[in-house]
Image (cartoon, helix red, strand yellow):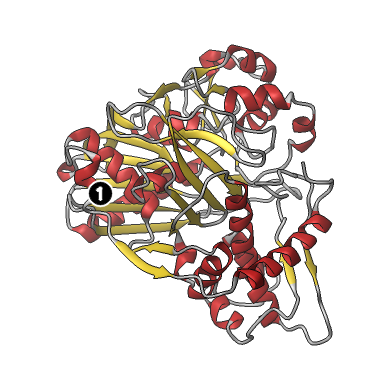
Amino acid sequence: MLLAIDQGTTGTTCLVVDDELRTVGRGYREIEQHFPQPGWVEHDPEEIWASVLVTAGDALAEARVSGDELSAIGITNQRETTVVWERSTGRPVERAIVWQDRRTAERCRQLPRDLLRSRTGLVPDPYFSATKLEWILQRVGRRQRELAFGTIDSWLVWKLTGGDVHVSDRTNASRTLLYALDEDDWDEELLELFGVERDLLPGIVPSSGLVGEASLLGASVPIAGIAGDQQAALFGQGCFSPGEAKATYGTGSFVLVNAGDARAEPPAGLLRTAAAVAPGAAPQFALEGSVLVAGAAVQWLRDGLGLVSEAHEVEMLAAEVDSTEGVVFVPALTGLGSPYWDPDARGLVAGLTRGTTRAHLARATLEAIAFQVADVLEAYPGHVDVLRADGGATANRLLMQFQADLLGCPVDVAADAETTALGAAALAGLAVGTWPDVNTLRRHLRPGARYEPAMSRTEARARRDEWQRAVRRALSRAPT
């Protein structure tokens, strides 16, 4: 039995997984979102930790196993979210600044884009950790040797090991703007740029391998897998070969294409990032497109506008109309990510008429998620034969069919929507010998529904053009 901890933006999921990669126990808890100012998004790190303990206990109880029966723990996490805590007490010095937070947009405009692009594969955007860390350090004014920095994986490993282990895996490190991707180490010039001392940082470890002993619910269990959520999903979808692609539909939507060992600069609008690999495998990379608002747009319909009382009602509402009748929603609620990278873009709804209803807006919201994913894959220089999809929104059949229509290729939905957590479990299991290699593991990856494109390419192109006209109006500047 393996325990997968999936600490996400809106909640924490824990799964108990057997040696056929089947879920036998599950726990879930939402976590509170804090919005102290417009564009600011924060989490309470202690609440995150408490949610892990509760959900792990629930998963073990449902599986009817004890902590002593676990072979290993795998951790996957919302990436880029930044935590700083005191080494002596383990107390956070501030709330965690979430990946969606835009407070450092002005600082990002001052940064050397070409340097960051060449060293890290990323772009200067508030999405990434470095400017968040810089902001916290300037605010607290403490000596850095008294503090520890980490993304959520580091925070959880620290808490699980009682402060004995301070590490991050290379997939999470590659999201900080502080990590030299090709050197597999923190970059001294970038540390100086952001005023960060090396002693503040976690050690970098492989995504699959033993890193420490966790004390969890009275048991001692090895931590053997760590990966950022999107890389964990890429692994959990079995995208082990170059050109294989997945999209995760969660709070945001993240498209990753396995790039193998390619070290070339990524195409404009896309990121190059570290991919998770099995123990002993050579480093791999991925090309990534990051859609900042996907499921969060549905949450906004629910919580901001009150159009639905539950998120799952959006599909039924959207199905009340055959089309949006020209309504287009650009959900730039926290700026726009790939391929535009405009933190100052603002959301808009275009094409409203007197006949527009809430059903049209619901349908336009679902279509906006698919349009953004299509924008990312259009920037990818190769050809994707099939898109593997996972995440909660894949249960939305209208969305998945429209995605296949836009792309003109099949969309394969994972049989288990918890692919991110299963990827973490797979990485941990490979490290402790649950499976001897990825080929054996692949036999346990179960396909689900397939959606074939049904829209003509002419119609799909016309819809894409309509969408992109609306995007240009949402941008704060001409796209680069």
- In the figure, 334 relative to 201: above or below? below
- In the figure, 23 relative to 2: above or below? below
Q: Is residue 441 left or right of residue 475?
A: left
Q: Is residue 165 left or right of residue 3?
A: right
Q: Nearer the viewer, residue 389 or 64?
A: 389
Q: Nearer the viewer, residue 437 or 37?
A: 437
- In the figure, 303 relative to 170: above or below? below
Residue placed under numbered mark 1 in the picture: 442
How many numbered marks, from 0 up?
A: 1
Q: Nearer the viewer, residue 429 or 370?
A: 370
Q: Position of residue 296 (x, y in %)?
A: 61, 60
Residue, x 69% and y 64% (percent of image)? 464
Residue, x 34% and y 46% (percent of image)? 423
Q: Position of residue 274 (x, y in %)?
A: 47, 32
Name which quarter of the figure residue 115 lies in. Answer: top right
Q: Sort mark 1 into few (<14), some (14-19) or many (20+) by Cα contacts within 10 Å.
A: some
Q: What residue type is disc 1 on? A: Arg
Q: Is residue 364 left or right of residue 402?
A: right
